[in-house]
Image: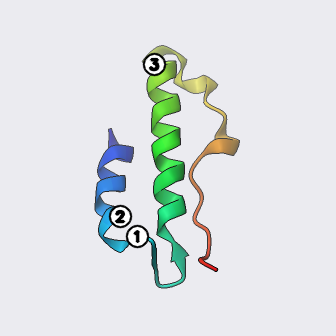
């Protein structure tokens, strides 16, 4: 799944890189992946887009 590959590519840049909160992005993507796996292929359309990973600035 692309979310898993994306998370692995982000890990070297955690916790932050160029003002992006990479750790939060990894956490959000991991949670989204788990929700999608739980829904399964037939119910992915039920995924709540409000819980999709979002890029945030580091503090």
User: Which residue in the protein does label 2 denote?
Assistant: 10
**Of tags 3 and 1, which is closer to the observer?**
1
Looking at the rendered structure, the secondary structure element under dot 1 is loop
Instruction: Kindly indicate whether the residue at mark 2 contacts the one at mark 3 (C-beta within 8 angstroms).
Output: no
How many numbered marks does the figure carry?
Answer: 3
Looking at the rendered structure, the secondary structure element under dot 3 is loop
The answer to whether residue 13 is above or below residue 9 is: below
Nearer to the camera, 48 or 20 = 20
- The alpha-carbon separation of the residues under discs 3 and 2 comes to 25 Å
User: Which residue in the protein does label 1 denote?
Assistant: 14
Residue 51 in the figure: left or right of residue 53: right
Query: Which residue is outermost to the right?
Result: 50
User: Which residue in the protein does label 3 denote?
Assistant: 40
Across and down, in percent, residue 26 comes to 45, 56
The answer to whether residue 9 is above or below residue 19 is: above
Across and down, in percent, residue 10 comes to 35, 64
Q: Using a 10 Å C-alpha cutoff, classify the residue at mark 1 as few (fewer than 14 neighbours), some (14 to 19) or many (20 or more).
A: some
């Amino acid at each position: 799944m692309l979310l898993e590959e994306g998370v692995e590519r982000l890990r070297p840049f955690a916790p932050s890189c160029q003002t992006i909160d990479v750790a939060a992005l990894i956490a959000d993507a991991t949670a989204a992946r788990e929700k999608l796996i739980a829904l399964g292929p037939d119910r992915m359309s039920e995924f709540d887009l409000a819980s999709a990973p979002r890029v945030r600035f580091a503090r």
